Image (spheres, helix red, strand yellow):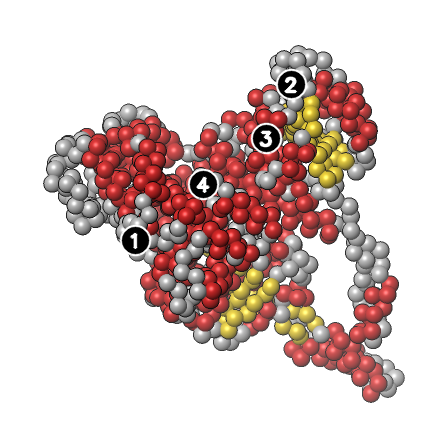
Amino acid sequence: MTAGDASPATADVLRDETPPRFGSVPEVVERLGSVGYLADEQIATVVFLADRLAKPVLVEGPAGTGKTELAKSVASLLGARLIRLQCYEGLDEAKALYEWNYRKQLLRIQVERGSGDDGGSSSAGWKELEEDIFSEEFLLERPLLQAIRATEPVVLLVDEVDRVELETEALLLEVLSDYQVSIPELGTVKARQLPFVLLTSNDTRELSEALKRRCLYLHLDYPSVEREREIVLAKVPGIDVHLAEEVVRVVRSLRQMELEKHPSVSETLDWARTLVLLGVEHVDTSTTVATLNLLLKYQADIDQATRELTGRPR
Amino acid sequence: MLDVLTGFVEELRKTGLPVSLTETLDAAEAVRHVPLEDREALRSALGATLVKSSTHWDAFATTFDVYFSPRATPMALDGAPDDVGVLADDSGVPPDAGSAQPAGGAGEGSEERLDAEQLRALVAEALRTGDDAALPALARLAVRLHAGLEPGRPVGISYYLYRTLRGLDLDGLLAELLAAATGSAADEASLHVGRPPGRLGDRLVAEELAARIGELRRLVEAEIRRALVADRGASAVAKTLRRPLVEDVDFMHATGDELVRLRRALYPLARSLAVRLARRRRHRRRGTLDFRSTIRRSLSTGGVPLEPRFHAKRPAKPEIVVVADVSGSVASFARFTLHLVYAMASQFSKVRTFVFVDGIDEVTKIFTRSASITEAIARVGAEADVVHLDGHSDYGHALGVFGERWGREITSRTNVIVLGDARNNYHAANAEALAEIARRARRVYWLNPEPRAYWGSGDSIVGQYAPFTDGVFECRNLRQLERFVELLD
């Protein structure tokens, strides 16, 4: 062993200690299927590699293609706790990592002042107080720290990471690459187990190179007609195979139009469920137009689609 | 394997993908964990580690096909390992019409006897029934029959692709299939599974057929690529395949295929730009101290105002006036920029558009009255009254008329964006007109689709206008256009 190996990074140690969660790619497909997530080979491969390489996965793609669902499914099949960090503009360290409970600290100081005010607040007393108010008791754990300090298996979902500012992104880097966090008053907190980390992005902003470099990348697009049909059949009880086929083809047709927002998978499912409830056997133009508001959420889109569906055939 | 990987990464970089050293190491680590004979898994593993942007995926997939062509895996149809025989045309292995192919009478003949007509019928049948398993074999046969591959001949894939597709006559096939499909009502073929009645049904059938033909096209292309790789080696083929990434495509010299890719990239770009602009506008400045809210918040910290609160500021959205040269040389650039501006119109309080060649006309109404931006842009070409004398760009005249007729409507909130190459055909520059506009407007920007090196050469007089603008920007591709739009406020 060389000197350089004396203190290997947390991630490496943990990776060597943690047994792999999955045996093979087909196993991932199967286990994801067992919790109701129909994964294609690409999704499964990335999940498999994320485990083997101990790297976070960055999932990007249009809204409603099952990005968040993937994290939930992985958590449920691993029997792990899902810790979710929902990102938003203005998210900062205090909300992502940790925060000192300053209200409680203030109270503690006031109590101290009230009880032991015997002339000289000695330096020893101050030291004691400082150690006291910067102890675990006053620490508020936020999702990132929770995921690092957890002793049981966890899946960390950093949702919509493209919403945070560039500076906040840097905060994620230390956590994601080394699985450790530095807290000035407590020192460095190292992970005790390897969390399975998923980040999702709706692609509204180019993420920093540094963040992308540390992640495996998975682009989740709308599923192919075949896969979407499988999803519809699996998720909508009592739907006829033919109706399912019609549903996904109409949805594909809509996705080829130039619209503000294309129907997502969850909207396909909503639509299919509605059609089943309405007792529709075959989708025709009038049924589609009448129920378009389930698939499209902008009036301009609905108008546009109506025009194209009822207008002249191409 | 490592050698192949290094060459592969090298090629990706040459295509323009930013692949770092750590990512290469990750890829090397990743391929250790997947079975190498599984091409899909290998592709996913390399893709997940090397490609970090969805717009780069196509370039990656093409390069992957070249470097890891499925030569080793036997084809579904004839079971014979693929060899250079495709090129030399000496292959004695007849395509044995196995399970994949419908018993169509071609199976028993050797490939020489399978003529164009028979192949066409087989392809039509496979497309009609949606027999996906047969398509790869048919693509292979089509390449043998039509491409006329010549070993060592230094032509690109597109040449062979064109020949093969011409031989197959896919457009004719599509028309025939469509006519047949939309006519007959009850058909057992898979095309009609999931076919609702009426016009919607016709539409869906057409789309399904188009999708299948697209798949066949893709297979043919892959087949040719593979044959060429066998002939010339991966890196040579990759070099001929190198195409610019969509954000680097030059507006002025885009091919038809590239234009399609560009248009597809516009919408997501517009959306993300809109989000960025809105976000920045909201965040840039905080308003004045909100005293009431600060005191209210301080109650929870025992009256100590730890966190000052501020009034949110609501800055006005900018007003945009686009003045675009739509003469032949720069028309496609103008179209793209207008498309982008209108796709993010919600971010501006007002957008007005003027187009000119040597005359100038306002076309804002066309945009408000059209159903879609695409339609509006098509109508601008047909309806705008832009030719004054001879139909050659005359910036001086156009700007002069613009100043006279609409100059008073330009206010201190207006951002004026001029689109054009300032190639004035040796007319008078009339830079004073622009100066007058600049005096009234908040900002004047000029976007020039020409490379900076050409500015001022020949009849380009962008230099005479530049002093009166707040900046002349070289704007040749999406990347530069995106950078500019972020400046708007």
* Disc 4 and disc 2 in contact, CB within 8 angstroms: no
Q: Which residue lies under the disc numbered 1? A: B38
Mark 3 and mark 2 lie on one chain; the one further toward the N terminus is 3
Q: Residue at x 73, y 40 (%)?
A: B350
Q: Amino acid at mark 4?
A: Pro
Compare residues A101 and B398 and report the one nearer the observer.
B398
Rendered location of residue B143, percent (x, y): 26, 34
Pinpoint the chain carrying mark 4. Answer: A
Look at the picture and state if A91 lies above or below B402.
below
Q: Amino acid at mark 3?
A: Arg
Q: Which residue lies under the disc numbered 4? A: A313
Assign a secondary structure to mark 3. Answer: helix
Mark identifier at residue B387: 2
Is label 1 or label 4 in front?
4
Q: Residue at x 79, y 32 (%)?
A: B410
Q: Relative to residue B216, is residue B200 drawn left or right?
A: right
Q: Which residue lies under the disc numbered 3? A: B379
Mark 1 and mark 3 lie on one chain; the one further toward the N terminus is 1
Look at the picture and state if A8 lies above or below B271.
below
* Disc 1 and disc 3 in contact, CB within 8 angstroms: no
Q: CA distance from mark 4 to mark 3?
A: 21 Å
Rendered location of residue B277, percent (x, y): 68, 46
Mark identifier at residue A159: none
Assign a secondary structure to mark 4. Answer: loop
